[in-house]
């Protein structure tokens, strides 16, 4: 964490603070104060907000310290009176409304880089709120901003909006000040505007939680290796000069406006879960759209399961049913988490074994989550993915959470049988995996369904039969007859107890 130093003379020895950093500081601090205000039945007060108590966390967002101390010790108003609301100076009674006032002072500091009590050069000291008010009355708003910020005309609209928020926070009357939760929403809107500016300036945009360890130039200089060609575009392995290896997906057929694209990226970027591949960064300029993810060195489940070994990478033992069950449970958890996003309406749209990887704990981890929202519901199923698509997708291009469940059912059948979704039969015909499994089961040859590598392994038969039942419920022809993904997770976790006992790590969230 880094101490935040705002004031200083232009050109002097002071930290560089670009606009994006200042917005992150404001957004993070606002979130922190708003969270404090939800505690103790929504009555907790910070009581001593000032820039010296705001730090930067590892993602360069503002982080509030000394929270709630005003509730435990007598506050010395005189020491920090420049941050205190008028009612606090008169009565020493702090409140959530006075916290909002103090946060408003912080916003004015970020915009002007002046101290709350600003020296004009002589002996006169001017209150920052009065200074900003005097400039605003003369309709010379831009003159109040830090000269470093004025060099970038693209951000003027954002600065004016932040100034408006700051001035509403420092209103003299408490009831005229917004709630901190409302301030967070307004600041998030400015953060979104800042993200869009990155597109105009041709910059790689990092999602919240990832520190920029490289930029677009580093990516373009890196050696690239094609990993695969899929429904949404091609994937590449890129090894950067600093030693970092990343996976870059180059999208094609995107069907959203340049204004809507950052919003979609925000949704995907916030979709954090240990079983969902996290979006690190993205880039968009005209038709060139890149998405950056962590690189999973063991390869996809498809390549592991069907024998495409990666040089210098230890082989994953797919002869163990426990390994395949971990993959299934992890992938199910990941898809179920995706389904909780956007008011429980988000769809994956491209669930298949080549989009599932192994995380550090060797559980399945789902990639490409939410990309169907960029393509629209009219996206054409790729031939390579056809074996995973539900009937309603193949016939009417109707993607849904139920069609995700169907696709996961195919993945589960793949793990159980060791066969690809469309495979060659002994008579030379091409079989759909689902149809083949149904034909075997109908002849009472259920155990013949399972991969030869799994047959005969002690104490696995019951768990595999139960998993087969789960898979067949997922691939029901009628969407409403399929279980919800959250139900699939529960069933698979229950199966893990059959194989590994009540203390199985698969049972742990």
Image: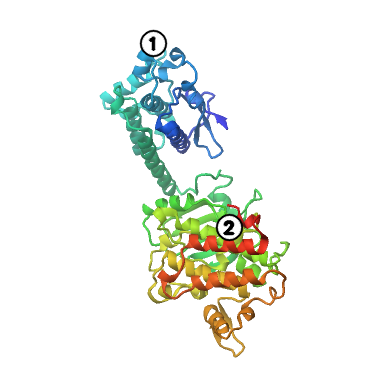
| Element carrying mark 1 | loop
Near mark 1 (Cα within 10 A), the count class, few <14, some 14-19 or many ≥20, is few
Name of the residue lying farthest toward the bottom:
427
Q: Residue at x 56, y 56 (%)?
A: 275
Instruction: Answer whether residue 236 is visible to the viewer in this image.
Output: no
Q: Residue at x 41, y 20 (%)?
A: 83
- Measured along the vertical axis of the image, is residue 186 above or below residue 469? above
Residue at the disc numbered 2: 247
Residue 14 percent location from the top left of the image: 53, 26
Instruction: Answer whether residue 322 is visible to the viewer in this image.
Output: yes
Quadrant of the image containing the N terminus: top right
Question: What is the number of the mark on residue 139?
Answer: none
Mark 1 vs mark 2, foreground winner is 2
Residue 168 percent location from the top left of the image: 31, 29
- Measured along the vertical axis of the image, is residue 379 above or below residue 419? above
Q: Nearer the viewer, residue 210 or 238?
A: 210
Residue 312 percent location from the top left of the image: 73, 62
Give the mark nearest the N terminus, 1 or 2. Answer: 1
Near mark 2 (Cα within 10 A), the count class, few <14, some 14-19 or many ≥20, is many
Question: What is the number of the mark on residue 124?
Answer: 1
**In contact (CB < 8 Å): disc 1 and disc 2:** no
| Element carrying mark 2 | strand
Q: How many marks?
A: 2
Quarter of the view holding residue 361: bottom right
Q: Is residue 135 left or right of residue 203?
A: left
Quarter of the view holding residue 287: bottom left
Quarter of the view holding residue 479: bottom left
């Amino acid at each position: 964490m880094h101490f935040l130093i705002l004031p200083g003379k232009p050109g002097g020895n002071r930290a560089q603070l670009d606009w994006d950093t200042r917005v992150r500081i404001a957004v993070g601090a606002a979130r922190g104060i708003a969270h404090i205000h939800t505690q103790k039945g929504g009555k907790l007060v910070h009581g001593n907000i000032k820039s010296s108590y705001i730090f930067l966390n590892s993602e360069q967002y503002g982080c509030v310290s000394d929270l709630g101390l005003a509730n435990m010790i007598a506050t010395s108003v005189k020491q920090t009176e420049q941050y205190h609301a008028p009612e606090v100076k008169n009565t020493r009674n702090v409140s959530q409304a006075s916290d909002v006032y103090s946060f408003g002072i912080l916003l004015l500091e970020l915009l002007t880089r002046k101290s709350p009590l600003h020296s004009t050069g002589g002996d006169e000291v001017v209150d920052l709120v009065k200074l900003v008010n005097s400039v605003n009355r003369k309709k010379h708003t831009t003159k109040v901003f830090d000269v470093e910020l004025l060099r970038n005309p693209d951000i003027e609209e954002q600065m004016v909006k932040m100034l408006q928020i700051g001035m509403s926070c420092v209103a003299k009357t408490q009831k005229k000040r917004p709630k901190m939760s409302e301030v967070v929403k307004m600041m998030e809107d400015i953060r979104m505007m800042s993200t869009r500016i990155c597109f105009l300036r041709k910059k790689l945009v990092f999602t919240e939680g990832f520190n920029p360890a490289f930029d677009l130039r580093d990516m373009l200089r890196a050696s690239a290796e094609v990993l695969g060609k899929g429904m949404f575009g091609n994937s590449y392995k890129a090894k950067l000069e600093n030693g970092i290896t990343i996976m870059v997906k180059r999208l094609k057929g995107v069907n959203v406006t340049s204004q809507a694209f950052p919003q979609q990226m925000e949704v995907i970027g916030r979709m954090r879960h240990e079983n969902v591949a996290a979006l690190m960064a993205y880039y968009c300029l005209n038709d060139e759209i890149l998405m950056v993810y962590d690189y999973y060195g063991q390869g996809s489940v498809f390549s592991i399961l069907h024998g495409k070994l990666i040089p210098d990478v230890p082989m994953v033992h797919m002869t163990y049913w426990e390994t395949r069950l971990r993959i299934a449970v992890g992938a199910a958890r990941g898809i179920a988490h995706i389904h909780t996003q956007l008011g429980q309406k988000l769809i994956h749209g491209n669930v298949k074994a080549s989009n599932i990887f192994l995380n550090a704990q060797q559980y399945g981890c789902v990639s490409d989550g939410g990309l169907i929202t960029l393509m629209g519901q009219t996206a054409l199923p790729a031939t390579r993915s056809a074996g995973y698509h539900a009937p309603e997708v193949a016939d009417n291009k109707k993607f849904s959470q139920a069609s995700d469940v169907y696709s996961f059912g195919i993945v589960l059948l793949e793990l159980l049988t060791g066969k690809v979704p469309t495979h060659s039969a002994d008579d030379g015909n091409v079989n759909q995996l689902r149809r083949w499994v149904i034909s075997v089961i109908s002849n009472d040859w259920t155990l013949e369904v399972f991969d030869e590598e799994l047959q005969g392994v002690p104490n696995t038969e019951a768990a595999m039969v139960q998993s087969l039942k789960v898979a067949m419920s997922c691939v029901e022809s009628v969407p409403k007859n399929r279980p919800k993904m959250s139900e699939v997770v529960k069933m698979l976790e229950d199966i893990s107890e059959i194989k590994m006992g009540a203390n199985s790590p698969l049972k742990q969230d």
